[in-house]
Image: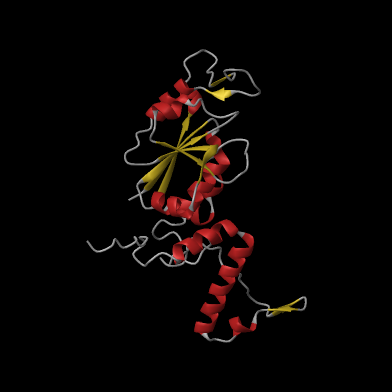
Amino acid sequence: MTFAATILTLYPEMFPGPLGVSLAGRAMAEGKWACETVQIRDFATDKHRTVDDTPAGGGAGMVLKCDVLARALDSAPAAGRPILAMTPRGKPVTQARIREIAEGPGVIILCGRFEGFDERLFEARPEIEQVSLADIVLSGGEMAALTILDACIRLLPGVMGAASSGDDESFEQSLIEYPHYTRPQEWEGRTIPEVLRSGDHAKIAAWRKARSEDDTRLRRPDLWERHKGVRVQPASGARRKDKEPDQ
């Protein structure tokens, strides 16, 4: 099954962009995924092909029109694919959500521009997920869409090679990844940690686990708190309920 990506954008020439090379480019050539763009401006009905207007209530910038966006979105049948709108007002995307999307038939991504979307679009199309990459503001949703697609494509069967090659990546286990080293063994007075040269796979695994946990605790306390919360739950994933007294 081909993973089908449809991008609604004012700048279709930005796609597939960097996703046309390296692993993603090869996967596209092999038919593992496909990328279709929809020019939002094609769905404007006035002679100037207007896609935006001034904010109601005043303020700087322009707002993307809900009627134009809805027509563009309705032209791309979902066919079981989730619909993402890239916006800094959205919920930060997680690796778990990326994995869910990659396991499905594809994705539709709506790229924001200017001051954002007319809110009525989301009221009228509640199936749209408002998604952000991080607590940053970009010039538009296209770069964020490319990032989302890259994260999905690398998880498609056969793209990375061995099925387990991504299991230890940052965020896959709610932790950031352990540090890596390679030759030369010594560089500018710094050497590869001895444990990694020991050949003792159990010690290496323990060292990597400890570094992953330590670095997550220091660099990403938010992830560390989430990780601790997962670890203290029973194996079933459910929290124990207080026993009721005997009747």
Q: Is residue 111 visible?
A: yes
Q: Is residue 32 above or below residue 13?
A: below
Q: Is residue 242 above or below residue 53?
A: below
180 or 93, which is in the foreground? 93
| Residue at the farthest right position | 188
The picture places residue 206, in percent across and down from the top left corner, at 53, 78
| Residue at the farthest left position | 247
Q: Is residue 16 visible?
A: no
How many numbered dots are placed on residues in this image? 0
Horizontal relation, residue 61 to residue 158: left or right? right
Q: Quadrant of residue 215?
A: bottom right
| Residue at the farthest top position | 47
| Quadrant into which the C terminus falls | bottom left
Q: Which residue lies at the image location 52% right of the left edge and 28% below the top edge?
A: 117
The picture places residue 34, in percent across and down from the top left corner, at 42, 45
Q: Which residue lies at the image location 59% right of the left edge and 81% below the top edge?
A: 196
Tell me, what colour scheme is on the image? Answer: secondary structure
174 or 187, which is in the foreground? 174
| Residue at the farthest front position | 247
Q: Is residue 41 above or below residue 168?
A: above
The picture places residue 93, in percent across and down from the top left corner, at 50, 47
Q: Which residue lies at the image location 55% right of the left edge and 45% below the top edge?
A: 133
Horizontal relation, residue 51 to residue 103: left or right? right
Horizontal relation, residue 247 to residue 219: left or right? left
65 or 175, which is in the foreground? 175
